[in-house]
Amino acid sequence: MLTTLLRDSRALGVLAVPLVLTQLAQVALTTTDTVMMGLLGTTELAAGGLAIVIFNQIRTMGVGLVTSVGNQVAAAAARAEQSADSTDPDASDGSGRSRESAHDEVRAIVRAGLAVATLAGLAGALLMILLGQALAWLGQDADVVHLTQNMLFALAPGLLPCLWFQAVRQFTVGMRRPQALLRITVVSIGVNAGLNWILIHGTFGLPRLGLTGVGIATSTVYLLSFLALYLSAKKDRALAPFLALDINRTDPAVLKRILGLGVPIAATYGSEAGFFSVTALMAGSFGPDALAAHTAVNQLVYIVFQVAVGLSHAASINVSRELALGNHDGARRIKNTALTCAAAVMAGVGILYLTVPRLVLAPFLDTGSDRALTIATQLLVVTAFLQFFDCAQNIGVGLLRGLDDTKSGFRITLIGYWAVGLPAAWLLAYALHLDTLGIWLGLLTGLAATAALLLRRYSTALSTAGHLTASAA
């Protein structure tokens, strides 16, 4: 069994490691933003953190809309490869599709993905600004609200290229060629840090923009990252034939399929992000120090969460591929392999949280607020255990997506987050007066319930699919 696990881990790692590293490099962008916001002061960190929460809420749902592009491309590419093994280049792959039709399908999927990204980017930018205007009605500090609104105006234009980048990214991952993602994202970290410094402090004769400069820098980096990824893909002979910007030629049937899969994924991601967004508002009700502590710890969770995101995407793509090739046993082992790899990483990180909490928090809470640091240190104890469930539920969502079962994930997150987690957070924070600590205990409860339900659903759905395949044979 150990030999099989190691073999499967290596196979998963071929795709997962570049994705994990890319995710970690990508989150370094917001980590850099958070560190620089913390240097500006507690109020700026609280306001910037709130703006990033709103941006991430909308961005995450937009990403969800195009996430199925990777799975659909992976399945179509697997069918094309299967047909390529035939002596007849136009031979059917057994599903009624020839290799050429499978190639056409990949092109149509990519085109539809870019069309969805465009629509979501425009609508999301408008929604982001409207939500910023509504903050004054939600019990937040007036100074925090003003700074948050200004930063949201600066972040809104970056949503469109951000989602274009994600659509092209899903295409490259589905084709199992994600290597350029890491190089581009690493370079963007340095560009983002430089632009942040220049725009915050007004160097080279530019105006001193403070917190708003962070938003402008982030939007600029998203645009540059998309252009770099698109040009890199166009230079890749295996990718270039499938990539075009003529979204006006989008096939309505393919667009409908992408949206049919993407809307539940977006709702699932939105359900999770909304859960965290509501808890951020709850933390803000306990004052700027509590919100600053919540923001710092949430950023740490977000960093570690990228390991799960990379594993989830890789597992999801591999499940789609294995099922397209009719290998249900391989799809079943992928779950155990991904969870084992995630647990090993989470255990190591949890030990750091429990043994050197102040060292871990130092980059995020250098604000002179002892109260914020005390609150954050308490939250890290909960986080050491919370992240196991956070990673497991994300991997569960990815596994179900590999089965093209995107609706179950949404239904389950509604139960886990909103019917279990949020009531628990409210009860512990307000009724039992545990304040921010109670919020995070509620988060842990909701994530644990969600993870258990998702993984159970995957095992059940995969078993059902295997029985149906066996019966058909």
Image: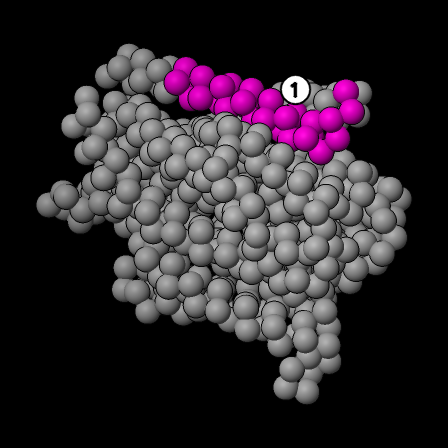
Tell me where residue 334 appears, x and y as whole percent: 31, 29
Note whether 365 is above or below 271 in the view shown.
below
What's drawn in magenta, residue-wise? 432-461
Query: In percent of the image, x 62 and y 76: which residue is there?
Result: 198
* Magenta region, main secondary structure: helix
Give the left or right position of residue 237, taking residue 122 as reference: left
Residue 327 image point, x, y percent: 25, 27
Dot 1 alpha-carbon crowd within 10 angstroms: few under 14, some 14 to 19, many 20 or more: many
Name the residue at 25% across, 35% down: 9
Q: Quadrant of residue 442?
A: top right
How many circles with numbers are drawn on the protein? 1
- Of residues 241 and 61, the one drawn nearer to the viewer in this rendering: 61
Q: Is residue 252 above or below residue 214?
A: above
Q: What residue is shown at x 73% (from left), y 73% (from top)?
A: 209
Q: Quadrant of the N terminus?
A: top left
Q: Horizontal placement of 132 versus 33: left or right?
A: right
Task: Pinpoint residue 169: horizontal percent, then vertical percent.
Answer: 43, 54
Residue 420 % position (x, y): 65, 19
Q: Which residue type carries mark 1?
A: Val
Q: Quadrant of the C terminus?
A: top left
Asked whether 124 or 353 is in front, the reply is 353
Q: Is residue 443 visible?
A: yes
Residue 305 visible in the picture: no
Q: Is residue 25 above or below residue 208?
A: above
Q: Residue at x 37, y 20 (%)?
A: 462
Q: Which residue is mark 1?
A: 420
